[in-house]
Amino acid sequence: MKRLLLISLVSLILFSCKSYHGPVEHKENYTQGTFTVTNNYFATIGEEHIFRAHIQAFKKELSGLLVVKRMDEQLHRVVLTSDFGNTLFDFSIYKDQPYTVNYVMPDLDKKIILNFLAKDFSYLVEDTYTLNAKAVEKNTTVYSGKYKKKKTFVVVNQQEEVTEVIAASARKPKIFFVYTKEKGAVIEHKNFPIRIDLTPVGN
């Protein structure tokens, strides 16, 4: 009994200490270097994207129309309105500086919620990643490196489109950003009850 308990304990320690290397079978598959990955999804200045949004954040649940627009090289505007046209939140997401809250409804005006939402959208709209490792597996290429101080993996398909971005700690994935074939997107946290589903309107 003691021996079985010891084996289980050692296995647990070894598993918990294992580093996370993204959606790649072996970390040795990565080639080191400097790689620039472009995500064109929200890259065009002046282009407006409209989504039917469903947001679950902690005990809050929101639905409405989400508008994402790139204003210039440094700024994206992200606005969620209700079906009746009322603004629920309005963020300015900058490339190299903290986000700005232009407006938020009182029920959402909590720092923890605002931080999560703004950081999620900053990942979602990022157009350029400079990463330091690359692995080619099956029909995808996976790039690995640091973005906004987090371990980050960017998955690119054969058409050179970004299909997934993963923000992770050293040992496990934290947030998945999935870009769908229908030009929608999903953001899902693994450690917190947060999920954002974006379905394009008019496509």
Image: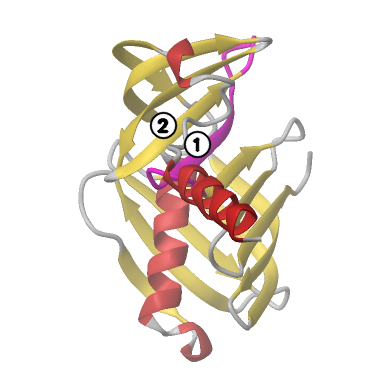
Q: What stretch is highlighted in magenta?
A: 157-173
| Closer to us: 14 or 146 | 14
Residue that badge 1 annotates:
42
Amino acid, disc 2:
Asp
Location of residue 151 with respect to 13 vertically, above or below: above
* Position in image of residue 9 (x %, y %): 53, 55
Residue that badge 2 annotates:
127
- Camera-near label (1 vs 2) is 2
| Closer to us: 157 or 45 | 157
| Residue 61 inside the magenta-drawn segment | no
Splitting the image into 4 quarters, where does residue 61 fall? bottom right
* Position in image of residue 13 (x %, y %): 46, 50
| Residue 165 inside the magenta-drawn segment | yes
- Which residue appears at 41% of the width and 61% of the height? 118
Can residue 66 be seen by looking at this rendering? yes
Which label sits on residue 114?
none
* Position in image of residue 55 (x %, y %): 65, 67
Disc 2 packing (10 Å; few <14; some 14–19; many ≥20):
some
Number of marks drawn:
2
Residue furthest to the bottom in view is 106
Question: Secondary structure under badge 1?
Answer: loop
